């Protein structure tokens, strides 16, 4: 068992004595395709560490089951529900024959004691909580309905920056370069930790398959933890409809939850619409380089730029669920 555990990326390079102690608390399982590994709403008493096989994760938000993710070898299923004493937040069904190990809360604490595991799992926990967050419904002034939620690694097809409606000019204004984006950049834009790199994705609720029409993100600076750089992407048909102001307000809500006090923004001097949005938030610009302006401004106050206080609270709750719940779960375990 120790050799099999050490072969997982999560535990690669771990001390054999620690792995042996962990192995003594785990029970091996071998599940056929179609097995229900976790059922939404049921009490949680154990977690599953997947060694081989895959599983589908789905959730019912009141309108039927919707697939929200997948489980691959090296993944952990159900650990946050165990530690938080909460019911299962999703249903997980084996897509292929699956093997792994089952453990209780005590075993999960031992897992987190393995050096390096806690840091790797914090990112995973935040992304899992982001996937469980209920989207926030928003109506633009012209009556168009949108849904806003934290971005997920599975949102490659929802990324506004890769949509046909995101023109070459819009791409240049966003990235200061010509399209297309490389695969590495796309992965960077969707695989975020929701702490140092937070991103909202905006979906067109009235259109088939809810295509992505916008995204907004902040990326914390390494040497100044209270400052984060912000960026926005909006497909052409949704520009000039108040979405940029909304996105700045939505980012402000998430940033405040994560301890960010100031936003840095870099925009092309010719990008007057984005400059106007930032000026209304108090921005004053200086030239950073030829043709590029930079500003450092205070994070807008709670609710500024958002349609109403209910929307502001819903966005805050969505961000807080990720930020606070992951910290509490992993902090309690440690």
Image (cartoon, rainbow, N blue to C red):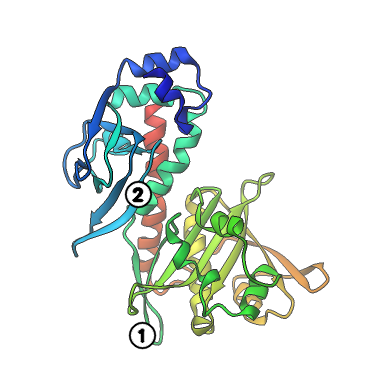
Counting the numbered discs, the total is 2
Dot 1 falls on a residue whose secondary structure is: loop
| In the rendered image, the vertical position of residue 169 relative to residue 23, given as above or below | below
Badge nearest the viewer, 2 or 1: 2
Taking the view exactly as shown, the residue that stands out farthest to the right is 290
| In the rendered image, the vertical position of residue 265 relative to residue 121, given as above or below | below
Name the foreground residue: 95 vs 322: 95
Q: State the image coordinates of residue 153 (x, y, percent, origin top left).
A: 45, 54
Name the foreground residue: 3 vs 131: 3
Q: CA distance from mark 2 to mark 1?
A: 35 Å
Image quadrant of residue 270? bottom right
Q: Residue at x 18, y 62 (%)?
A: 64
The quarter of the image holding the N terminus is: top left
Q: Which residue is mark 2?
A: 70
Residue 330 circle label: none
Q: Which residue is mark 1?
A: 143
Q: State the image coordinates of residue 149 (x, y, percent, origin top left).
A: 40, 62
Q: State the image coordinates of residue 290 (x, y, percent, origin top left).
A: 83, 71
Image quadrant of residue 106? top left
Question: Dot 1 surroundings within 10 Å: few (below 14), some, or many (20 or more)?
Answer: few
Q: State the image coordinates of residue 206 (x, y, percent, origin top left).
A: 32, 79
Name the foreground residue: 56 vs 155: 56
Dot 2 falls on a residue whose secondary structure is: strand
Whether residue 164 can be seen here: yes
Image quadrant of residue 48? top left
């Amino acid at each position: 068992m120790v050799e099999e555990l050490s072969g997982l990326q999560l535990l690669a390079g771990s001390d054999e004595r620690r792995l042996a102690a962990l192995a003594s608390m785990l029970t091996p399982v071998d599940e056929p395709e179609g097995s229900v590994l976790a059922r939404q709403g049921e009490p949680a008493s154990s977690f599953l560490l997947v060694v081989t096989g895959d599983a589908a994760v789905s959730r019912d938000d009141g309108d039927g089951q919707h697939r929200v993710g997948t489980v691959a070898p090296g993944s952990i299923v159900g650990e946050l529900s165990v530690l938080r004493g909460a019911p299962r937040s999703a249903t997980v069904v084996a897509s292929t024959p699956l093997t792994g190990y089952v453990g209780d809360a005590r075993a999960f604490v031992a897992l987190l004691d393995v050096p390096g595991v806690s840091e790797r799992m914090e990112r995973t926990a935040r992304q899992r909580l982001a996937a469980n967050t209920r989207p926030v419904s928003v109506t633009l002034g012209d009556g168009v309905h949108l849904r806003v939620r934290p971005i997920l690694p599975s949102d490659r097809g929802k990324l506004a920056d890769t949509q046909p409606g995101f023109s070459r000019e819009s791409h240049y204004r966003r990235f200061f370069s010509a399209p297309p984006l490389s695969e590495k950049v796309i992965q960077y834009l969707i695989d975020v930790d929701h702490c140092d790199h937070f991103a909202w994705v905006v979906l067109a609720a009235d259109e088939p398959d809810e295509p992505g029409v916008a995204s907004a993100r902040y990326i914390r600076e390494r040497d100044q933890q209270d400052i984060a750089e912000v960026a926005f992407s909006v497909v052409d048909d949704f520009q000039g409809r108040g979405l940029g102001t909304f996105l700045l307000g939505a980012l402000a809500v998430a940033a405040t939850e994560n301890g960010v006090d100031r936003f840095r923004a870099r925009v092309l001097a010719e990008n007057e619409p984005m400059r106007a949005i930032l000026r209304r938030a108090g921005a004053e610009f200086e030239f950073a380089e030829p043709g590029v302006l930079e500003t450092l401004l205070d994070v807008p106050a709670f609710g500024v730029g958002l349609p109403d206080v209910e929307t502001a609270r819903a966005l805050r709750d969505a961000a807080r669920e990720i930020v606070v719940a992951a910290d509490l779960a992993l902090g309690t375990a440690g």
